[in-house]
Amino acid sequence: MKIRLLIGAVVAVCLALAIGVTARASTSHTTTPTIKGMVGGDFDTQLPPGSTSGADWGVDASFQRPASNLIHDTDVKVVGAGSGDSTDFTGCTGTAANPTAPKGKVCVYLIGSGAAANIRGVTPVPGTGGSKFGFKLIWDATANGDTFVDAVWAYHFR
């Protein structure tokens, strides 16, 4: 009888642990609904002959864990001086010191840039595809030589 009780207790503890781990794994974003990161690049560029712009650059930013929705071009907004973003959602009310984002969106807050214009965020997946794993920051160089963009971002899980 004591052995059956002991085996029953061990099975109950194992089941409780398994249920707890499964529940935590499926709702891990609820304990930290916003993830944040940094993105940027610095390149030496040569514009096409006779052009004032045209050399374009892009860098990918990866999320620490997959997003709860596919990120499309319309889900990424760049704010700050030099932004060329025409994304029309609102809610990027944070700052570079405290980045925030509305649910299901990425807000990119520019820290600084040089010889860069039309800075915007897009999905790294071409066409109408989206990605749960990150986004791309792109811009146009405006002069020969050094071009750079530095920014912080936030994504809020749905």
Image (tube, grey):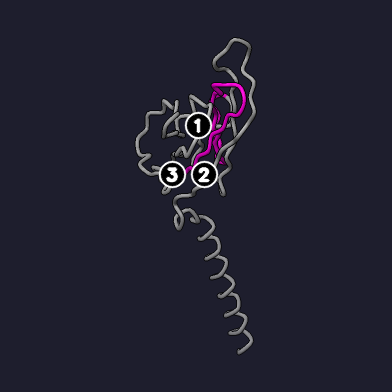
Q: Which residue is mark 1?
A: 121
Please say if 12 is above or below 61: below
Residue shown at the point (58%, 42%) measured from the top left: 62
CA separation in Å, label 2 and label 3: 21 Å
Q: CA distance from mark 3 to mark 1?
A: 16 Å
Kindly report the secondary structure that dominates the magenta region of the rendered protein.
strand
Q: Amino acid at mark 1?
A: Gly
Quarter of the image where the N terminus is located? bottom right
Which dot marks residue 96? 3
Say which label, 2 or 3, has the lower sequence index: 2
Q: Nearer the viewer, residue 6 or 137?
A: 137
Secondary structure under the numbered disc 1 in the rendered image:
strand
Secondary structure state at the residue bearing disc 2: loop
The residue that appears at 50% across and 56% down in the rendered structure is 28
Mark 3 or mark 1, whichever is nearer to me: 3
Label pair 2/1, CB-CB below 8 angstroms: no
The residue under label 2 is: 67
**Looking at the picture, does residue 35 appear above or below residue 51?**
below
Percent x, y of residue 124: 58, 32
Whether residue 29 sits left or right of residue 141 in the image: it is left
Q: Nearer the viewer, residue 106 or 93?
A: 93
Residue range corresponding to the magenta coloring: 127-153
- How far, Cα to Cα, is label 2 from label 1? 16 Å
Is 144 magenta? The answer is yes
Name the amino acid, label 3: Ala
